[in-house]
Amino acid sequence: MFEILTTEQMYEADRKTIEAGTTGDALMENAGAAVVAEIVSRWTPSSVTVLCGPGNNGSDGFVIARLLRHAGWSVRLGLLCDADKLTGDAALNAGRWDGAVERLSPALLVGADLIVDCLFGAGLARSIEGELAELVCAVNACGVPVIAVDVPSGVDGNSGEVRGVSIKADVTVTFCRPKPGHHLLPGRILCGQVVVRDIGITNQTIRDIRPSLMRNEPGIWLAGIHWPSVDGHKYHRGHLLVVGGASMTGAGRLVARAARRAGAGLLTVVADPSALPVYAVDSPGIMTAPIASLDDLLKDCRHNALVIGPGFGVGDETCSRIIPLLHYCRCTVLDADALTSFAEQPSTLFFAIQGPTVLTPHEGEFARLFPDIEGDKLSRARAAAKRSGATVLIKGGDTVIAAPDGRAAINAIEAPWLATAGSGDVLAGIIGGLMAQGMEMFDAACMGVWLHARAGADLGPGLIAEDIPEHLPVLLGELWHALPK
């Protein structure tokens, strides 16, 4: 269950479930009961205010209010519109509510020990403004726990972006599968803890929809790992070339260490001869070669993967070095300076990409390479992957990985400690090491992001980039031992 559904796909899942014989009313009853179960598991009966909008989210609110009152809670309910304006299942559930229906205002919050946000669901189509924005601000300022239904009101379920203002929830209960807005910033922060509850939509229904967006977890790429075999040797695990800088050697050294820890069988750092002693002394397990020999090395098919960019330098010389390398169609990771160098001529880079290639920009590098691609992070990553023909990974607290064929994944692991110098170089090395072993580029990018984020979360405060490669054996061991034997 790694799928992430867009709001449109969730509507389709509802529709298919209803067509199969489950009524919309039953789905709402199940949704309301799921939220109430979450509430009673966390808080003791007290005073609760339920804020309802005019649509299906508000209809869930009427179910929640009714079930909480039956469970002994003191419930106040506010509605955005007049009750007689409700239609369909919303009108049906409003009719079952035997309490007062009050006008939405900050006065509803007085005396509340808990607030349930059922104003809008994930499909909010307009910005929250005016009096409603004042109510949202009052909710955020009142200092009591807030539980949001589906997504906090004001958060766009597809992008995680805020439309006007947004409620900041402590807990968000959503149904069947999460939506992009639960994982993309800033929605991810505003949701608080996200709980996904079953309401009667089958896994087969989700498979029929064929979602192409996943939460980045081992289940989506574990089968693609090329584990070493008993009768294998180092040449079976790939020979990665790392093109290192002449002066900023630290970046290349981090790439090399991470790639070897990720499993690359052999690794050669290719750099200016003056820098080779620095690379050689860093680790006895690497080989070195002068950069003038790079073309000859790539003519040998055993050198099957390449990482270039970290610490290499920005400019025309970098561009002129990279273009012919791409013609060898090796598995390639382009990061940092390799991306920025093409800011004035991105189409030249994209035209040259012929083999499996991963681009790993942060937001600044992305803007330089794709200045005309706008929108939310997921949409931009997909558009960039389609244009470039490469897997594109936009780094950040909500890293998105997108393949040219439309597949995408979002990192769901919180690891703020990764915001440290050299962390991105390590990520490039991990991905390069996985690709050298034969892993498909999208899977390698996803696995690399997961390993990187898990290491950041596990190591925590005090982490520096050098720590990350040393934690990879622990994580790889967990994955290995989790396989069926």
Image (spheres, rainbow, N blue to C red):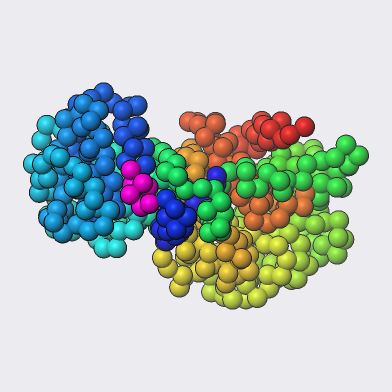
Which residue occupies 71% across, 62% down? 356
Residue 329 seen: yes
292 lies above or below 100 = below
Determine whether, in the image, residue 473 is placed left or right of residue 12.
Answer: right
Q: How many marks?
A: 0
Identify the image quadrant of residue 87.
Answer: bottom left
Classify 130 as above or below 183: below
Between 421 and 55, which is closer to the camera in this rendering? 55
Query: Which of the 4 image quadrants contains residue 124?
Result: bottom left
Outermost residue toward the top in this view: 44
Residue 339 position, x and y percent, is 58, 63
Residue 364 lies within the magenta run: no
Q: Residue 190 sits in which quadrant?
A: top left
Residue 151: x and y in percent read 34, 48
Q: Quadrant of the N terminus?
A: top right
* Residue 28 is inside the magenta segment: yes
Taking the image as shown, residue 84 lies to the left or right of residue 444, namely left
Q: Position of residue 131 (x, y in %)?
A: 12, 54
Residue 82 as seen in the image, left or right of residue 188:
left
Q: Nearer the viewer, residue 84 or 383?
A: 84
Specify the segment rendered in magenta: 23-29
* Residue 105 percent location from the top left of the image: 10, 47
Query: Which residue appears at 64% of the width and 59% of the height?
Result: 358
The single residue placed furthest to the front in the displayed view is 21
Name the residue nearer the viewer: 307 or 29.
29
- Does the rendering let one see residue 246? no
Residue drawn at point x = 33 percent, y = 47 percent:
28
Q: Residue at x 49, y 51 (%)?
A: 4
* The C terminus sits in image quarter: top right
